[in-house]
Image (cartoon, grey):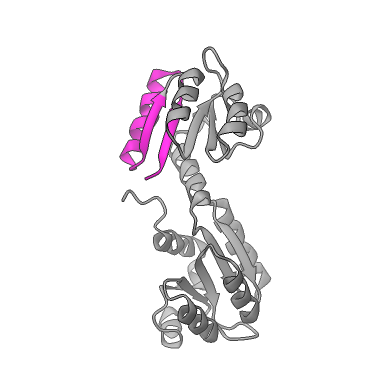
Amino acid sequence: MMRILIVEDEDKVRNLHAELLENEGYEVVSVSDAVQASEILIRKHFDIILLDINLPQVFGSVLFDLMQVFHKSIKVIVTSVYPVEEQRKIMKDAAEYYDKAQGVDVLLEKIKKVERSMMPLGTILIIEDELKIRKLFRNQLEELGYRTLEAEDGETGLELFAKEQKIGLVILDIAIPNKTGMKVFESIKGRTPPAKIIVSSVFPKDDQQSLIKEADDYFDKAEGVEILIEKVKQLLNVGSKN
């Protein structure tokens, strides 16, 4: 379970964020200032910290600088009434930035984006010969926090899959040069049966399934990239409360 520390001096905001995250299945600890936060960080590990800037006694930026030295593995999401661009100037290189005026739904999506980036199997291999489509898939997936790798043909895709250790999912076109999608699928599943593969094609899904049986899912490119994103999320169990 992902563990989150909230460092926020406003009681109402702190309690709202804590309740939201607990309902999403996260383990949450909340404190009202940077001194309490630094003390609890010595005793307990956290995955993500929601860190306000204007805190009593010690500013959030001071705690952030200390974390860059002693707690580098913890991802920091800056939360403030300041606009995001000002937050970036104050705390450079945080994982994410959240303007409190954006609303809690935006905060939750930013947390899940950071969570996805921390997943050990969050890398997605896109094997697709059309540059435009590869770029579209890559941009959409990286915006959500996934790491992506790209291959324009079957041979390159297999080489990347063999080389990389953290590929959680493959998006595989059928009609690709230097080994068809069918051959690539057989090779990946033969070598690594648990590997998740979404077949992606201009062919209707019934035709895809007749060509490549037992894929984890099928995507007709006419459906739109939003459908593909949902299939990716479901297969990688992102944001699961379990």
Seen as rendered, the residue at the extreme top is 57
Quadrant into which the N terminus falls: top left
Please state the horizontal and vertical placement of residue 130, each as a whole percent of the image: 65, 74
Question: At 64% from the left edge and 72% from the top edge, which residue is drawn?
Answer: 151
Above or below: residue 115 compared with residue 72: below
Above or below: residue 68 compared with residue 52: below
Q: Tell me, yes or no, whether the highlighted magenta stretch contains residue 33.
A: no
Visible residue check, residue 203? no
Q: Quadrant of residue 217?
A: bottom left
Q: Out of 201 and 48, give the one closest to the viewer.
A: 48
Q: Quadrant of residue 11?
A: top left
Question: At 49% from the left edge and 33% from the top edge, which residue is drawn?
Answer: 49
Above or below: residue 11 compared with residue 142: above
Please state the horizontal and vertical placement of residue 84, each as a whole percent of the image: 61, 32
User: In this rendering, would 177 be left or right of 225?
Assistant: right
Q: Out of 117 and 12, give the one closest to the viewer.
A: 117
- Residue extent of the magenta highlight: 1-30
Question: At 64% from the left edge and 37% from the top edge, which residue is drawn?
Answer: 93
User: In this rendering, would 232 be left or right of 66?
Assistant: left
Q: Out of 11 and 61, give the one closest to the viewer.
A: 61
Q: Tell me, yes or no, whether the highlighted magenta stretch contains residue 19.
A: yes
Please state the horizontal and vertical placement of residue 100, each as a whole percent of the image: 50, 28
Q: Out of 68 and 53, give the one closest to the viewer.
A: 68
